[in-house]
Amino acid sequence: MEVDDGSGRYVVTGVALLAEPAQLLPAREQMALTLMFHIILVPLGVALPTMMLIANYKGLRRNDPVALTLARRWSHAAGLTFAVGAASGTVLSFEMGLLWPGLTGRFGEVFGLPFAIEGIAFFLEAILVAVYIYGWRRMRPWTHFWLGLPIPFIALAGAFSIISANAWMNMPAGFTLGPDGQLTNIDPGAAILNRALPYELTHFVLAAYMAAGFTVASVYAVGWLRGRRDRYHRLGILIPFTVAAVLTPVQFVVGDLAAVAVFHDQPAKFAAMEVVTTSGGHQPEILYGVYDSATNTVRGGVRIAGLDSWLAGGSVDTYVPGLDGVAAADRPSNVTIVHWAFDTMAGIGTVLIPLALWFGVAYWRRRDVPRSRLFLWCAAAAGALTYVAVEAGWIVTEVGRQPWIVYQVLRTSDAVTHADGVWVSFTVVLALYLVLGIGTVAVLRAMSRRWRHTDRTIDEDAVYGPRPAATPEAGR
């Protein structure tokens, strides 16, 4: 018999109710907290070095001290966020083993290689970021630039390794599960290059560059709104906003392809994302609405007839499996959360397209930032919106896969630790992340205030400042 426990989670019962492990809820809450904090720092770690180097290159090619000032300041912000991300990522790594021994103990030799790759990438990036920051005015300008050039690629290698592990959890590969439950034919290469990797990695990297680009630009858009309309703030908007604006329509297409891939690979997750209750064709697209697990229906929401089937298969007749075809015990643990997160992510990506087009048309016509205050307000809000979308995307990925920690192979409840004290560790991690978060914001604000009260274009007095006479020939 299948019983609804009142929270949207179903458990299977025989003669008596089989309760979930007591550690499952605090372990999931702690993992969610860690991931949602760490993901704030990842886009900056992945994408900010690219924008920093664009500004550095522009400064050297055109002997532009303003661009060099931006590059130096962004390098210090990148160093700070990298350091904090290292701390939060280390906690996350320990949690994988301590909270989910059923996963790492049983499948570690299958999907453990990406974590080794991530460790190597982390140390390489840490060394190069430190050298780059230290190298201002201590190296020839072009030597300094070329030493920083590998940083974005190493950051992408780190992102590749982590996304590969997550994609493997969605589409497990690289092993054979014997009738006795033992693993055979283990192939770590096949595990890394699993079927979900291409669309998950592409979707995430684009999201990271969009989030970092819009967020960095939003800082200077706020300054522009406050009357700081100098070349420093103009470049501070143009460089990151251009990167994000170019990638926004690309992400719209990639996101659609990723959703179609989920439709084929994880039909139960897709049904939760689109809150498809009954299998069949002519499925409507339901915007928001609340899923009722007791009756398998949706209350409220805006319905667009046939659109969901058309998006899934290019025709309103496309058959879309619904939640009615998924055993209650195998449905995502909270369909409403998954659906709202998906709608929020897709909605934000959609509304950013006209903002990107607005910027593109204005720059094509006048080679400048749009002067409209409405645009500047939208640009200032875009950074926060993209981070909401990034958080929502991870909710879709992780909550939508439940109750599986490895899709259709290992349940989350079977992987969780049996040790006591998980609520205590959750409290400790919460306190740690509060300190890290408050400290990071405080340091960034202190850096901003210091920069704002000094010359906005030239920092020649700082030992790490840009060279006042940097030219392309100077570094040759």
Image (spheres, rainbow, N blue to C red):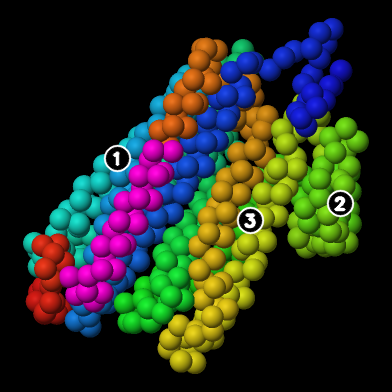
Indicate whether 188 appears above or below 471.
above
Task: Identify the residue at horizontal 56%, vertical 20% (top origin).
Answer: 416
User: Closest to the observer: 39 or 447?
Assistant: 447
Q: Is residue 76 above or below residue 434?
A: below
Q: Which residue is mark 1?
A: 120
**Which residue is at a point 57% across and 54% down the rendered structure image?**
388
- The picture places residue 454, in percent across and down from the top left corner, at 22, 70
Secondary structure predominantly adopted by residues drawn in magenta: helix
Dot 3 corresponds to which residue? 345
Identity of the amino acid at label 1? Ile
Residue 22: where, in percent of width, then height?
63, 16
Location of the C terminus (image quadrant): bottom left
Q: CA distance from mark 1 to mark 2?
A: 49 Å
Question: Given contact means CB atoms under 8 Å apart, are the residues at marks 3 and 1 in contact?
Answer: no
Classed neighbour count for the residue bearing mark 3: other residues with Cα under 10 Å, few (<14), some (14–19), many (≥20): many
Where residue 93 sits: x, y (%)?
Answer: 41, 31
In the depicted view, which residue is nearer to us: 81 or 380?
A: 380
Label 2 is placed on what type of residue?
Answer: Gly
Viewer-nearest residue: 84 or 131: 84
Please name the amino acid that badge 3 sits on: Met
Q: CA distance from mark 3 to mark 2?
A: 19 Å
Q: Is residue 309 magenta?
A: no
What residue is pinned by disc 2?
300
Helix, strand or loop at disc 3? helix
Q: Locate residue 114 relative to residue 351 in the image: left or right.
A: left
